Image: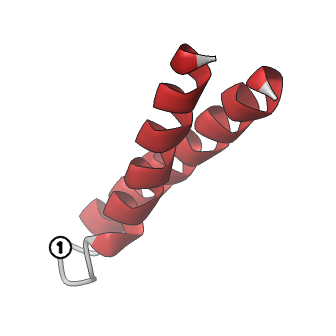
Amino acid sequence: MKKLALVMSIIFTVLTFAGAGYVIYNGGNVNAGYAVVPMIFALVSIVFYRKK
């Protein structure tokens, strides 16, 4: 379970940076949720990893 949380946190962190790059590439004209939503899941996964 701990390894799964680590893998999920890595995946969501990569998605966060990809979403931020997408928002920056489009000049901020797209929704910032592309970066924020994966960041929330990444933080939850990281906290779960550290608690286990």
Q: Which is more toward the observer, 12 or 50?
A: 50
Q: Residue at x 55, y 52 (%)?
A: 15
What residue is pinned by disc 1? 28
Provide the secondary structure element on which disc 1 rests. Answer: loop
> Residue 32's x, y, as percent?
25, 71
Q: Residue at x 75, y 22 (%)?
A: 2
The image quadrant of residue 43 is top left
Q: Residue at x 27, y 81 (%)?
A: 31
Quarter of the image that includes the C terminus: top right
> Residue 11's x, y, as percent?
66, 43
Q: Label 1: how many residues lie within 10 Å, few (<14), some (14-19) or many (20+)?
A: few
Q: Is 47 left or right of 26, judged from the image as shown? A: right
Farthest residue toward the left? 28
> Residue 50's x, y, as percent?
53, 16
Q: Is 5 left or right of 12, judged from the image as shown? A: right
* Relative to 44, residue 15 above or below: below
Q: Amino acid at mark 1?
A: Gly
